[in-house]
Every structure is written in structure tokens, then in C-alpha cells.
Image (spheres, rainbow, N blue to C red):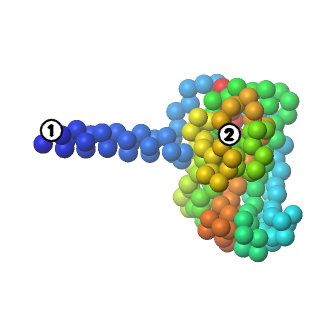
Amino acid sequence: MKKILTVCLMLSFVFVFSCASGGGGAAQVTGELFPGTWEWEVENDANDGGTSTIEMIDNGDGSRTFKGTVTNKYQYGMGSVTLKPDAATLEKLKVAKAIKFKMQSVEGKAYIAEACLSSVTDWGFHQRILRTNPGEAMDFHLQFKSFIQPPWGTQKRFNTELLTHIRILTKNAAEGGLGDYEFKVWDFALEL
């Protein structure tokens, strides 16, 4: 009986720990937040012969809305948002512990956050899945130490000094991310 109770307690701890550190929901920020200056760019799969779309709308209140459609004309069809830091923000990015932002998805789809390193040359960037609930504004606090590479990429050690930019993208057509999407992002900041 004691062994069963110990195993149950251990599993409960693992479940609570994984839920608390998994992305959405309230997040504990322990460091200084630095909003930085970012250039926001969108890209679809047209360069690969695809027909997926993405549109960026600056809402005028510090938030941006992204909407479009992921099609399967190109197998990896998707829409992506790239946050390019200015020189001062890039210096902070290279020493940051985490990124923090708010996100609201209309459909409640899953998205991906990517930490892009200069050492990765095959698009196999370190990433985290962003699970959203329909219409719910969610807080994301993503520690860089929790980002992992997809198994198909050439494995590179994560090193914040090699960070160049951040991306938020739709799940691609091959991963089941087909169809319309719309999400909003605001309060993007680095945790130092």
C-alpha cells in the first residue's frame, strides 16, 4: 500500500509540474521583463509554390492580429510571424531566460513558438507548442531551456548567445494545421 501511495504521489507531482510549466495559464515571472523593439514580419508558403495565407493587422493598441488559411498545395504549408529585434533588443535576447506574451486564438488551434539560432540551417529550430482555447486570452511564459528541436532537424545545442529572432507560426499542413486561423498577440517581452 505504501508503494502504491508513493507512486501516486510521484505521478501527481509530475502531472502538476508538467501542467504548470507547459505554456498557457498563469505564469510565474522571476526576472526583469524587457519589452524591447521588434520588427514584425509575416510570411506564407508562396516561395515554395503553396497557397497558404497570412495577414497582419496592427490593432493600434500594441497588439497585432494574424489571420489566414493553411492549405496543402505545399505539403508544409503554413503562415509565420517573425519578430526581428533591433540591436539593443538582440543583446538582451542573447541573455534572456524566457519569452512572455499574451495570445488569443479564435479557433483554439495549436501554434508553435520557435527560438531561431544562427547555428541551425535546416529550419529545425528549437520550439514549443502553444496550445490555445477558443476565444480565451492566455498567458505564455516559455523558458528557453524548455525549447526542443524537432527530431528531423540536425541536432544543435541550444545556446542563447546564438539567438537571432523569434517566430510564431501555425502548425503546418503535414501536422494537421489545415484551414482558417486567427490569433492575436500582445505584451511580448523578454524575461532577463
Which residue position is annotated with label 2?
156
* Residue at x 75%, y 43% (from the top left corner): 120
Mark 2, Cα crowd under 10 Å, few <14 / some 14-19 / many 20+, is: some
Name the residue furthest bottom: 73
Q: SS for tag 1?
A: helix
Residue 3 seen in this snapshot: yes
Name the residue furthest front: 154
Q: SS for tag 2?
A: loop
Say what amino acid the circle numbered 2 marks.
Lys
In-image side of 16 versus 125 (left or right)? left
Q: Disc 1 or 2, which lies upstream in sequence?
A: 1
Which corner quadrant holds the N terminus?
Answer: top left
Q: Is residue 46 above or below residue 103?
A: below
Which corner quadrant holds the C terminus?
Answer: top right
On the image, the x and y values in percent for residue 5 come to: 19, 41
Mark 1, Cα crowd under 10 Å, few <14 / some 14-19 / many 20+, is: few
* Residue at x 82%, y 57% (from the top left corner): 43
* Most foreground residue, 123 or 93: 123
On the image, the x and y values in percent for residue 62 come to: 76, 44
Which residue position is annotated with label 1?
2
* Most foreground residue, 57 or 74: 74
Separation (CA) of disc 1 from disc 2: 43 Å
Say what amino acid the circle numbered 1 marks.
Lys
On the image, the x and y values in percent for residue 170 come to: 68, 59
* Residue at x 70%, y 31% (from the top left corner): 160
